[in-house]
Image (cartoon, rainbow, N blue to C red):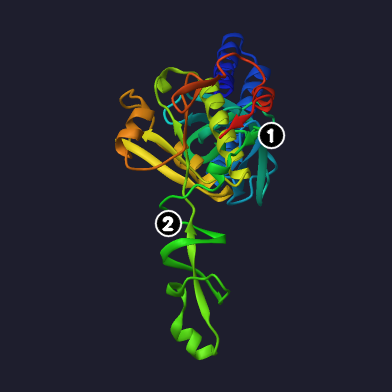
Amino acid sequence: MIHLIMAVLLILLLIYVAALYESTALVLLAFLLAGLVGSAFLLLLWRLAMLDVDITIPMTLAESGRPVGVRFPMRAKRTLLGKTRVRVLVEGRQLPGMKKKRIWLTLFAPSASEETVRKEVTMHCAGGYEYRLRRVRVYDWTGWFSLEKRVNRSAVTQLLPQVHELPIRLSGAVRGFFGEAEVYDDLRGGTDQSQVFQIRAYVPGDRLQNIHWKLSAKSDELMVREHSLPKGCGIVLLLGSKGMERISPGQRDRFLQIAASVSFAMVDAGCPHIVSWQDAGVGDLVRMRVDDEEGFYEWQLLYLNARAGGPETDIEACYVQKYRSERCLHRICIEPDLKVRLDGKDWHSFAKKGDLKEELGALQLYL
């Protein structure tokens, strides 16, 4: 637009000088330049009206530190009279409410078809990200003149924290922990009278109370009910919130990497556990049982979408107070200052800057 204004001023200047010196050549040059500018302006108006630009992110779930493909579908409603250079203004910000970053990207739109241009963007901090398309600027054949319009298209993606290996050893008490639960072991029987694990043939030593008399009468042999074994959670992973609003995005990402690595180590070792945190949106503790990889990814998504802030309370004390009747063997508490407590005692501090992968790999968690 600035170049267009400069061209108009130049035309006016040429007309003034031509009138001043009564120069026919300058008048012809001014009219020639005016025709060129008028044609460019009409072409720009046409291209601006006929071009539709959008923004999408097909991969709505990715891992931090890896490239994410941001796509710009461009569709020409009518012919644009040649391939068109386009510049778009994209605003990127980490949710919720983080500082916006603006960037201009150069694209090329097709003359009379649909085309998708892919740009790779890498973010190094876990969390939700929003990319909003704000302006579209189109150019004429010369690339000197341009017009732009405002748009409001957006796309969001969630970046999960990186997971690092953490050596872990589980005691027999943790592996054989018995407690009330709605989830039952698929491989072992137990003593829960309300659930049947399997029905099998009678073997000497089985209790008479477990004999399935109706089925035994039909099959002409003694059949026994084997009851289910509840899979209790003996480990609770607590994610603190003290000072969460004051830490940097990099420190928050380090905090999430530690939490995800501890949780994944327990999933990999076959140890069911509970993950709990404080959500200011609901004003209470939120907790989720994690038995497998599906639950591992689910709790991270819930946590990333939770609203941070609220009263800075001791999450371990709050959890014990709220679930005082619940049996558990160990409580692991991770605070935003990167200190980890095990059963109320300091276990390790990750506050020193360094390679988190090496630091976690050098430790061993005994439960």
**Callout 1 secondary element:** loop
Direction top: furthest residue: 21
Q: Quadrant of residue 161?
A: top right
Is 119 situated left or right of 247 in this image? right
- Relative to residue 340, is residue 222 depicted above or below? below
In the rendered image, residue 230, in percent from the top left (x then y), is placed at: 47, 56
Q: Secondary structure beneath disc 2?
A: loop
Mark 1 to mark 2: distance in Å? 68 Å
x, y percent for residue 54: 55, 43
Between disc 1 and disc 2, whose residue precedes? 1
Residue holding disc 2: 182
Q: Residue at x 56, y 49 (%)?
A: 292
Quarter of the figure with the N terminus: top right
For the residue marked with disc 2, what is the amino acid? Glu
Residue lying at 35% horizontally and 34% vertically, measured from the top left = 319
Front-most of residues 267 and 191: 191
**129, 329: nearer the viewer:** 329
Image side of residue 248 versus residue 270, left or right: left
User: Which residue ends up furthest to the front in the rendered image?
Assistant: 205
Q: Which mark is residue 141?
A: 1
Q: Quadrant where the C terminus lies? A: top right
